[in-house]
Image: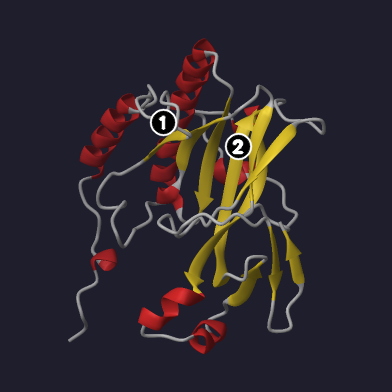
Amino acid sequence: MYPYNPKQKKIRGWKRRIKQLERWGESIKQPYLKYFLTESGRHTYERCYLSPFYRLDKRQPPLWFYKLIVAKFILAFNKWEQTFKELNIPHDLQLWLYDPAYISSEIICHKMKQPGEFKRFSCESDIERQFPFEWFANAKYDLTLFDWILADDELVHFESDLEYADFSGQDLFADGYAKMVQEDGTAYYNKRIGDIWIGRRRGLMNEDSKNVMQEYYPATASLPQRNSREQRQIKGEKTVHL
């Protein structure tokens, strides 16, 4: 007898889930500002935490339902845009669309030090690809109103954590991971599992924009941030500059 796998269980009650989605969409129209407005506050964000998708072992919704989620994010983005404009605090408002890890998508606003600054991320991809407008297209929103940057959705394991794992670095290599070493000597293994499209309102960024780089590990939210921006890939692989 095969072990029970909740991901294989058929999802029922779509009308009820759409109603839940409607309530969730209303709840995120105003950003949570309590932490953002403090001196140490750096960002505020929202994700779609609806069951049975957003769990420890996440399950992805079908594309048609994901587009309903994106529509709610767009409505919230428009509201957030006005809210942060009225606050008159330097900020960088972004929409992150994951593919195929749909349920990890989010709307996020970073507090910046100066007007015109933008947050850039180490996970931004070297792959050159146009945003898939046809794939995400829906009558409820217009994604051409955004500028999009492709980033890598990755699984990450730090070498220091392998001491407590039931697998080794060689196992990770066999599974398609690459080993990376940062300037401070910290080693980790990563594997690309999909795309993250980072969207901002069209026309905000240009060649003269001031960018603030941040290390980011998309699939490992609990990992500590690293200070280094330049990494090199070892085991005979090419050098990567972030």
Position of residue 60 measured from the top left corner of the image (x, y, whole percent): 38, 55
Identify the secondary structure beneath mark 2: strand
Task: Say which quadrant the N terminus sits in.
Answer: bottom left
Task: Report the amino acid beneath label 2.
Answer: Gly
Label 2, on which residue? 199
Above or below, 237 against 230 in this view is below
Identify the secondary structure beneath mark 1: helix
Q: How many marks?
A: 2
Task: Say which quadrant the C terminus sits in.
Answer: bottom right
Which residue shows up at 60% across the image and 33% down it? 143
Label 1, on which residue? 72
Task: Report the amino acid beneath label 1.
Answer: Lys
Among all residues in the image, which is located at the extreme left?
A: 1
Among all residues in the image, which is located at the extreme top?
A: 86
Which residue shows up at 47% across the image and 59% down it? 219
Position of residue 82 measured from the top left corner of the image (x, y, whole percent): 50, 15
Relative to 59, 214 lies left or right: right
The colouring scheme, among rainbow, by chain, secondary structure or one colour, is secondary structure
Position of residue 72 measured from the top left corner of the image (x, y, whole percent): 41, 30
Relative to 132, 160 lies left or right: left
Q: Nearer the viewer, residue 197 or 189?
A: 189
Of label 1 and label 2, which has the lower sequence position? 1
Above or below, 147 against 167 in this view is above
Characterize the local packing of mark 1: few (<14), some (14-19) or many (20 or more) Cα atoms within 10 angstroms. many
Comparing labels 1 and 2, the label whose residue is closer to the camera = 2
